[in-house]
Image: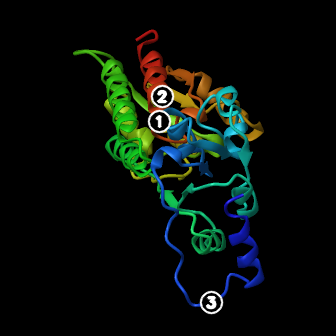
Amino acid sequence: MRHAAIWLAALAFGFGGCAGPPPPPAGPTDQLRIVSLNPCSDAILAEIAPGKLVAVSHYSHDPSAGSMPVDRARRWPSTGGSVEEILAMDADMVVASTFLPPATRSALDKLGIPVVTLGMENTVAGSLGQVRKLAAEVGEAQGGEALAHRIEAAIARAAPGEGGASPTTILWQPGGIVPGEGALVVDLMRRLGLRPASATRGLGQGDRLPLEAVLADPPQLLLHAGPSGDEESRTLHHPALRKLAMRRAEFSPQLYFCGGPSLIRAAERLAEIRDEQA
């Protein structure tokens, strides 16, 4: 493989030396071989550059951790993200989260394999910008623009009509935590007419919302994130909650792990829930 000689040389020298990383491999972007190490980039690249994608993260092969349907993700092999795996796949580019281990990033830099990193976006606009930016990086600007327009159109279709339902809403995630202010899913919920309940005011991402706060000021709609664990099940089925006049619905974590194309399915599901028995 093309990178094998570089890999052996790097091992021999222990990735040492003071020289900067070699330049990225030259060549047209239509010949890129991309390894994705992040479930969010997996889903975007599967839409805009399926022919260039040679591996997805292992998360996308796990129904509880991915952001796109597993049967689609399994069209590509998965990777745990080791440098050895990336080299074996003869990658020209790696797309990862900003949490990529520094040692892996350093090794890839020394091997001359460009790395594109994706951070966490907390607004729909930011997510659309991320789609467009990644698409430009991989030479698929037109595909990125098309995907962004599909997302915008799906959200516009799902928006409530004039005088439509606008229930106060809590999204309860496993462990009793809530997305809180500054979360992408909260921005999406607002766009679709789902108003954050007052019990969540002042809470940030990952903060825990106690049962007592919900009982004191219950929402009109309680979304729970998929199958419940023991602790969450006890909370959701607490006798006091059953006495409250509020609707409940399941909202899969697959729909809010990431932005990008996940926003299409998330918008459709939230609109469906909003309009049920409204």
Residue at point 69% right, 26% down?
71
Question: Residue 174 appears at what percent x and percent y?
Answer: 65, 41
Question: Which residue is pictured at 64% across the width and 43% down the height?
Answer: 54
Task: Select label 2 or label 1 by which is in front.
Answer: 1
Q: Residue at x 39, y 44 (%)?
A: 127
Crowd band around label 2 with a 10 angstrom C-alpha radius: few (<14), some (14–19), many (20+): many
In the rendered image, which residue does mark 2 sit on? 266
Query: Would residue 196 be visible to someone looking at this image?
Result: no
Residue occupied by mark 3? 17
Numbered circles on residues, count: 3
The image's mark for residue 129 is: none
**Which three-letter amino acid code belongs to the residue tagged 2?**
Ala
Asked which secondary structure carries label 2, the reply is helix
Looking at the rendered structure, the secondary structure element under dot 3 is: loop
Q: Nearer the viewer, residue 117 or 167?
A: 117
Q: Label 1 is placed on what type of residue?
A: Ile
* Discs 2, 1 touching: Cβ within 8 Å: no
Q: In the orientation shown, which residue stands out farthest toward the left?
A: 162
Gap in Å between the C-alphas at discs 1 and 3? 38 Å
The disc at residue 48 is 1
157 horizontally vs 255: left or right: left
Q: Categorize mark 1 by other alpha carbons within 10 Å: few (<14), some (14-19), many (20+).
A: many
Q: Earlier in the sequence, mark 2 or mark 3?
A: 3
Task: Name the quarter where the C terminus is drawn.
Answer: top left
Residue 52: quadrant of the picture: top right
Amino acid carrying mark 3 in the image: Gly
Could you say which is closer to the camera, residue 257 or residue 41? 41
